[in-house]
Image (cartoon, rainbow, N blue to C red):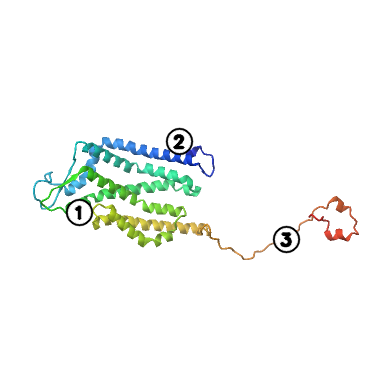
Amino acid sequence: MLKSARKQEKDPEGRMPLAAHLRELRNRLLKSVLAIGVITIIAMWQYPAIAHFITGPVIDAVGCPNGTAAAGPRTHPCAEITANGLLAPFTIMLKLSLTTGMVLASPVWLYQLWAFLAPGLHKHEKKYALSFVGAGAPLFLAGAYLAYAVLPTTAGALVGLTPSEWANLFPADEFLDIVTRMVLVFGVAFELPLLLVLLNFGGVLTGRRIMSWWRFMVLGITVFAALATPTGDPLTMSLLAAPIVVLYFGAAGICLFNDRRRKLGNPDAGLSDDEASVLDLTPGDVGEIEPVASGRMLPEQASGDPSDGESHRRGGFDDVT
């Protein structure tokens, strides 16, 4: 059932009917869901260790010394993570395990995404499939780790706004929602440079055009960081925006290098499909002219009268030839 529908096609150009495309999409989605599901089940067994791994840095940064946030006025505000409700621990375990499955299974679903799109490309473009997965998965994981690294700073900035006589209680489900949002947003944001490189290698965008957008891209990345981070403070925004900006300029440099390499190999590579290439109209040497023998005469022409001037003027050819 999971066998790729494209393997059953014999079309050398990879063309498929709509129903086959839908079956292929179903198979790719099912493989991705299975990979996420397997890792999610494994994460449920290790739920206490994973919960401590995520909440530990935040508790160390803003946790109360005596373990409670309601012990009276404090010089420095602190916070306590709580689970509200009878079913809260179970739902929190599901959320945390599912988030872990999506992050750790990113190499699998990234590959399935590329495998679904790759057959629509040319043969020389399919060789970038492994490069896409090899670069996409580390970038996603790097973004997720960056979100994990800025969590203590984010929590400290939020708790620092609390008056000293107030108590802070972090509902665990809301806290994990923030963690999930930051992990996914940071991970997806780190895929932007890879997307630009893929569009360049596919001939959609040039490196010069990508570089011409740098002002708008820096502004857009800054606005995106402000909307994606829960606190909106300049420090957290910079921690998200700065790496993406660096990756953007790195991707632009790769695209410029690829355009130069492509131009050296093919002078017409920079032309659009409806643009004519420059023609070389310099006359060339024809070389030695090879003599061409005349064709054989028809029998009735061969037996004609030599004194017939019309036959001599025709040179032995009939009216048709």
Q: Quadrant of the N terminus?
A: top left
Frontmost residue, 148 versus 224: 224
The label shown at residue 296 is: none
**Type of the residue with mark 3:** Ile
Is residue 118 rendered to the left or right of residue 239?
A: right
The label shown at residue 157 is: 1
**Type of the residue with mark 2:** Lys
- Mark 1 or 3, closer to the camera: 1
Q: Residue at x 15, y 52 (%)?
A: 162
Residue 213 image position (x, y, % from top left) = 39, 61
**Type of the residue with mark 1:** Ala
- Mark 2 or 3, closer to the camera: 2
Up-down: is 249 above or below 39? below
Report the residue marked by disc 2: 3
Q: Do we see residue 141 in this rendering?
A: yes
- Could you give the CA–CA distance between mark 1 and mark 3, rounded to whole angstroms? 88 Å
